[in-house]
Image (cartoon, rainbow, N blue to C red):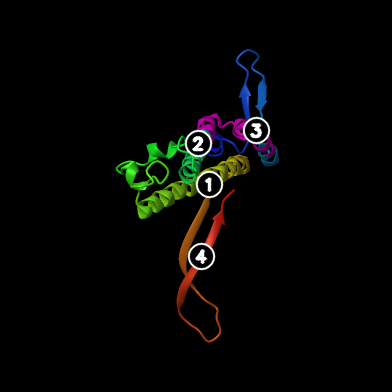
Amino acid sequence: MVQLLLIYPYAIAQDTLSPTTGVKKHQKTFNPDPMKATMLAVSFPGLGQVYNRKIWKIPFVYAGFGALFYAVGFNSSSHNNFMKAYQDFTDDIPETASYAKYIRGTDPAEYDPVLHPDTYNPSTASWVKDQLLLRVDYYKKYRDLSYIGIAAWYLITILDANVDASLHNFDISNSLDLDIMPARLPVPGFTGAGFNVSLKWSF
């Protein structure tokens, strides 16, 4: 019986003696409900892991959400800044020059048609305009991907809770064996050796 308890710690209930009364107490093993674990994970991220008694997963759950929300904030802020810079560059108001801090290594006299209408180079101005627009599209793309990442991570935490509860008492003992041995194949018109694959499950 001791060996059986060591092999199947979650598969059977254990009878123990009370240290005070000497009466046997029946200890019920934990058997989580996959549906309940899923519903808890859907209602609030991390609750499914708490229900499955996998508290150590909680930091990973919220670290993933934290990183993705940070990515959303960073990309949204950068998108708005470059959008404002692009709008300032394409308008005719000299006071709106927020784009200047994003353009380094190039003299404003070469690319700014509003502040330097006599010296600017149209091809350089067009290049600056395209670069600002590329940055707008770049941060918009990764902002949207970050939102998708949040939804995907949310689904992953739900799936993790469901699978964890479903496989909580899965048997991984040595009683499940796979043997490969030679055998004769009863195929009409064929004589020779072959392979027989058998799955043995010991109780």
**Spatial CA span between label 4 and label 3:** 46 Å
Mark 2 nearby-residue class (10 Å; few <14, some 14–19, many ≥20)? some
Q: Amino acid at mark 1?
A: Leu
Residue range in magenta is 39-65
Q: For the residues carrying marks 3 and 2, which lies nearer the camera in this image?
A: 2
Q: Earlier in the sequence, mark 4 or mark 3?
A: 3
Q: Amino acid at mark 4?
A: Val
Which residue bears the numbered disc 2?
77
Q: Earlier in the sequence, mark 3 or mark 2?
A: 3
Q: Is residue 20 above or below residue 164?
A: above
Q: Quadrant of residue 27?
A: top right
Q: Amino acid at mark 2?
A: Ser
- In the rendered image, residue 141, in percent from the top left (x then y), is placed at 51, 48
One can see residue 173 in this view: no
Near-viewer residue (123 or 84): 123
**Spatial CA span between label 4 and label 2:** 60 Å
